[in-house]
Image (spheres, rainbow, N blue to C red):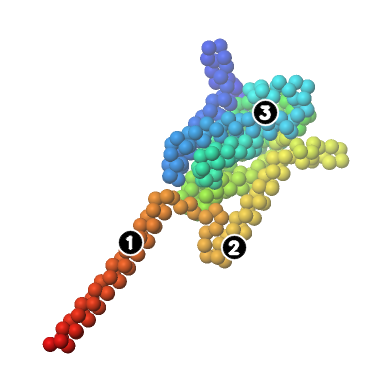
Amino acid sequence: MTNPNRVAFTLFGRDVYWYGILMALGILIAVWLTLKEGKRKRLTEDNILDMCLVVIPCGVVGARLYYVIFEWASYAANPIRILYIWEGGLAIYGAVIGGLLGMLVYSRIKKIRFLKLADCIAPGLVLAQSIGRWGNFFNQEAYGLPINNGALMWFPMAVRIDGIHYFNGELCSNPYHLATFFYESMWCLIVFIILWSCRKKFKHDGDAILTYAALYGFERMFVERLRGDSLYLIKPTDSFPEGIRISEMLSLIVVVCVLAFFIIRRIREKKLNAIIWPSPEVFPEEETTEGCEETCEIASDDAGTACEQAEETAEETAEERDDAQ
């Protein structure tokens, strides 16, 4: 098995890496899908593009800060390296958190429902993750446990890591490792198919982004434990060899919270026989239409009443004439 070159091509003396190309491709496709979904949700193209111009840089900053916070020891001696994002060190959970915070600010300024915006980006976000994970293959990173079973030493079940490399901070002499990047890429592709297929069936704003969070978190709980480059909340020690992996713990919390929310909301909606939080959004034209219908009904009632009164008056007049004759 021959590993591909990290460099896709050289332009004006500068190497262009596959990792960057795949990340850019994932972002472009995500923006395109968000535009399509935004149109379906009655958002303008300007709304979506402006939001993306806020969310994308916020996501990059969030991804970097998330990584640096939990790997501060690597940057403390030379903090300027925090800016060297081309050296690697971006965390997807940080990207999601940073992007959503930027979106929250944007939604407040533009007075657009936050959950509607979040639903628009959910399918494109997870597809971008699926594409971007292949950048880990070219960079030879985000790999899993070393393996010695010859039946598993084939791509995409496993990858061969060239040269000196480490697993959980220790030098590793075994070149074959589980291809955890591939597992996550395929799972994200499945999640995308689910979200894109079900997007018109969701009854509430927020259902798409919460479904994404639960499904992605479920996968990450298991794959994270296989990886050798995890960020730790509590690093492994002799007395606590497993440590606490931050992404594993965060995934568990997200999955439990989302499932609990869905279950509780479903029970309450069934009891009340109505859609509750978040309730369906009412658009201005719908309010106007409802108002016109009410006005027409009132006018119709008034006209009916007037006709009835006129008929009664005519009958009384006729009776008086008969009596007079």
- Of the two numbered discs 2 and 3 on the same chain, state the one appearing first in sequence: 3
Residue at position x 52%, y 65% in the image: 273
Residue at position x 56%, y 19% in the image: 16
Q: Which of the image's four quarters has the C terminus?
A: bottom left
Q: Quadrant of residue 225?
A: top right
- In space, the residues marked 3 and 1 are separated at their CA atoms by 63 Å
Q: Which mark is residue 234?
A: none
Camera-side mark, 2 or 3: 2
> Which residue, given by chain and number where applicable, does mark 3 sit on?
89
- In space, the residues marked 2 and 3 are separated at their CA atoms by 42 Å
Camera-side mark, 1 or 2: 1
- Of the two numbered discs 3 and 1 on the same chain, state the one appearing first in sequence: 3
Q: Hey, which residue is sitting farthest top in the picture? A: 13
Q: Hey, which residue is sitting farthest left in the picture? A: 325
Secondary structure beneath dot 2 equals helix
Q: Which of the image's four quarters has the N terminus?
A: top right
Residue at position x 55%, y 33% in the image: 54
Camera-side mark, 3 or 1: 1
**CB atoms of marks 2 and 3 within 8 Å:** no
Q: Position of residue 191 (x, y in %)?
A: 55, 44
Q: Which mark is residue 267?
A: 2
- Residue type at mark 3 is Gly
Q: Hey, which residue is sitting farthest right in the picture? A: 239
- Residue type at mark 2 is Ile
> Which residue, given by chain and number where applicable, does mark 1 sit on?
296
Residue at position x 54%, y 44% in the image: 114
- Residue type at mark 1 is Cys
- In space, the residues marked 1 and 2 are separated at their CA atoms by 38 Å
Task: Categorize mark 3 by other alpha carbons within 10 Å: few (<14), some (14-19), many (20+).
Answer: some
